[in-house]
Amino acid sequence: MTSHLNPGLARVHGGTDALGTVQHDFSTNSNACGPCPAAVAAVQAADATRYPDSTYTALRTTLAAFHGVDAWRIVLAASASEFIFRVTAWRRLQGASTVHLPPHAYGDYAAAAAAWGLQPTEGVDSADLVWACEPSSPLGQSHRNWPQDLARCAVVLDCAYAPLRLEGLPSLGPAQRQQVWQLFSPNKALGLTGVRAAYAIAPLHAQVEVSGLEALAPSWPVGVHGVAMLNAWAQPATAQWLASSLTTLRTWKAGQISALLSQGWELAPSEANYVCARPPQPADAQALCVSLRTHGIKVRDATSFGLSGWFRLGVLSPGAVEALVLQLQRES
C-alpha cells in the first residue's frame, strides 16, 4: 500500500449523502448493533426548550469521574471534527508551522492543517502538531510512529474507535496517554452518529493550554442532546451494552471476512469493527460504488485515504453481508 493523501478528496465522508440513507450502509464505522437503548432514551428525554449549562459543570464532573481525571482536563467540543479544527487553530496561534499526519487518515486532520497554513512533515520528532488515531481509520490498526518525547509537542490521539476495538491492545500505556491529548467521540460506539458531541482529555499539567482552547470555543458548543448522549456514555448500563455489542461484532466480523475471502477479495489486517478490502480484479471504484448504491448498498472508496483500489467496509449484520455478496456476484 502506498501513502498518498489527495487534498482534493480530503473532505470525503461516508454515511448519508445527497441521495439519502441506504438499507445497508457499509461506508461508516458506526456500531451496527446500535443505537444504544440507554443513550437513545437519554437523548429523547432531553429538554430542547432550554439552554444547557454554559459551563457544563455537571457533565465535566461526570466525564472526569468516568476517566479518573481532574475535571479541568475535560475539554468539550461540538464534535471531533470541530476539535480537530480548533486545536489546529490554537497551535497555529501559538506559533506552530508543521504538522505530522498518519499516512492513511481521516481527511479533516489535513484539511484543518491546510486551512491554518501548517505544512505536513515526515519527521514526527520535529513536528509542532502530531496526529494519531488508534485503531486507525481506515485500516483499523495500531499507531506505530510516535514521537520519542510525547511531551515535546502537541500530540493528539484520536480515540474515536478505541471503544470499538475488537482485538489487540493500545500501543501507549496509561502513563504515556497522560502526556497526550485524547479525543473521544462516543457517538460511533453508541450507534448515534447523528448526535454531534465530543470531548478531549488534556495532558497532565496543561492548564494553560486548556485555557487557550477554551478561549477559542464558541458559547454552548454542545447542545442538550449532545450533553444527554455524553452523560449516558458514562453510565454503567451503557458500558454493559457496549461490551455485549463487541461480542456480537466479533462474530459478525468473522462472518464478513469469510464472505469477502470467498469472493476472492484481499483484506488488510484490522483490530476494529471495519476492514479495508480489495476486489480480486482491479475495479473502477466510483462505478462500483454507484452501482452498489443503486441497489441499496453503500461502501467507502478508500482512495481519499490514499488507498486507491481499496474499499473500507464497516462490520454489519449477516443479512447485510449476504446482500452485499449477492450484488458483488452480479457485478462480476
Image (spheres, rainbow, N blue to C red):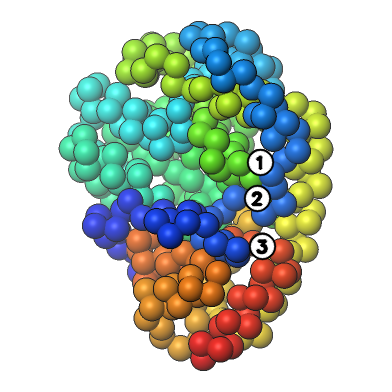
Residue 118 coordinates in the image, percent (x, y): 21, 38
Q: Nearer the viewer, residue 279 or 212?
A: 279
Q: Nearer the viewer, residue 266 or 332?
A: 332
Marks 1/2: CA–CA distance: 6 Å
**Which residue, given by chain and number where applicable, does mark 1 sit on?**
190
Q: Secondary structure at mark 3?
A: loop
**Which residue, given by chain and number where applicable, does mark 2 sit on?**
31
Residue 284 coordinates in the image, percent (x, y): 37, 81
Q: Secondary structure at mark 2?
A: loop
Residue 240 coordinates in the image, percent (x, y): 81, 38
Image: 243 above or below 59: below
Mark closest to the chain's N terminus, 1 or 3: 1
**Which residue, given by chain and number where applicable, does mark 3 sit on?**
316
CA neighbours of label 3 inside 10 A, class few (<14), some (14 to 19), many (20+): many
Q: Classify residue 132 by image quadrant.
A: top left
**Which of the numbered marks, if any, corresponds to residue 321?**
none
Can residue 167 be seen by looking at this rendering?
A: yes
Q: Residue furthest front?
A: 49
Q: Secondary structure at mark 1?
A: helix
Q: Nearer the viewer, residue 105 or 318?
A: 318
